[in-house]
Image (cartoon, rainbow, N blue to C red):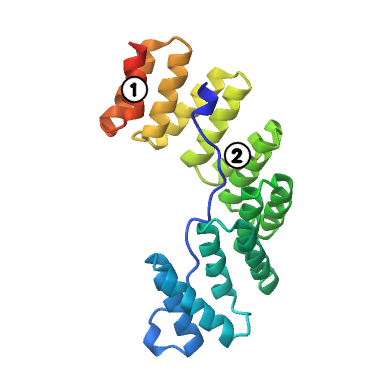
Amino acid sequence: MAEDAVAAVPTEPTTLRKPRIKKAPDLPILERRNWLIHLHYVRKDYEACKALIKEQLQATEGVCEYAVYVQALILRLEGKIQESLELFQTCAILNPTSPDNLKQVARSLFLLGKHRAAVEVYNEAARLNNKDWEICHNLGVCYLYLKDLSKSKEQLNLALQLHRQELSTMTLGKIHLMEGDTEGAIQTYLQALQLSPESTELLTTLGLVYLQNGLFQKAFEYLGNALTYDPSNYKVKDLAYKSV
């Protein structure tokens, strides 16, 4: 089914927050340790990172927001979603004016399948920052899982108004297909291609929609373009061979 071609997932915040420092050697011990925590995390040296986090939390009696935040990220990477959620909630208590902390709480709730609770927290984050396209996108994804397609489309369109990007477009196109609006999906994907003409995911998805609606010439045109940009895309090759 064409609607299965795109898996809608909430986004992670696009960047890891950096401690507000530039050079470690000239800093007080706590700030320097935060800098090192960040350094080891981005290098994916998680064991060294966890050791530094432990030192930092002992030194600050557990109230260093940045150390708790990165510890929560690592726990999530390890699949310990509930523990990660609890630490992100701690971050939100330590700094209740941070929309990023709330976004992480909401994402953890989503990963636990608590979509309605995630919506509530994303809405709290939106009240702190109503210009963040990721919050709108993630609300759209949550509403999609809750089968409220109208609210999902509303939030995805808000995300696209704030920032034209592929992720919300793909999810919006999926909803059009779920509603049986093939033409709406095609127009959504075509508009996105104007911004990302070399996106193999968009080209492949559009080719699939045309293929499943018997428009073979257009299907092979877009699937062929996808192969041009990604010759090793075996998924597209397999689809093309099966359709001959």
Q: What residue type is labelled 1?
A: Asp
Element class at badge 2: helix
Label 1 SS? helix
Reading the image, the residue beneath label 2 is 156
> Label 2 amino acid?
Leu
- Answer few, some or many: residues within 10 Å of disc 2's Cα (few below 14, many 20 plus, some between 14 and 19): many
Do we see residue 97 in this rendering?
no
Residue 228, position in %: x, y?
Answer: 26, 29
- How many residues crowd mark 1 within 10 Å: few (<14), some (14–19), many (20+)? few
Q: Does 29 appear above or below 86?
A: below
Answer yes or no: is residue 196 visible.
yes
Going 50% across and 67% down the picture, which residue do you hit?
17
Q: In the rendered view, tell whether residue 69 sits above or below residue 81.
A: below
User: In x, y percent, where is residue 12?
Assistant: 53, 53
Q: Name the residue under label 1.
A: 238
For the residues marked 1 and 2, what is the alpha-carbon distance in whole angstroms?
A: 31 Å
Q: Up-down: is 61 above or below 15? A: below
Q: Nearer the viewer, residue 46 or 199?
A: 46
Please report contact status of discs 1 and 2: CB closer than 8 Å, yes or no. no
Tell me the number on the disc at residue 15: none
The disc, 1 or 2, on the residue closer to the chain's N-terminal end is 2
Left or right: where 213 falls relative to 83: left
Q: Residue at x 63, y 67 (%)?
A: 87
Q: Quadrant of the C terminus?
A: top left
Point 42% across, 78% down: residue: 36
Q: Which of 186 and 29 is in front in this view?
A: 29
Q: Please tell me which residue lies in front, 217 or 48.
A: 48
Closer to the camera in the image, 113 or 187: 113
Quadrant of the image occupied by residue 8: top right
Which quadrant of the figure has residue 208?
top left
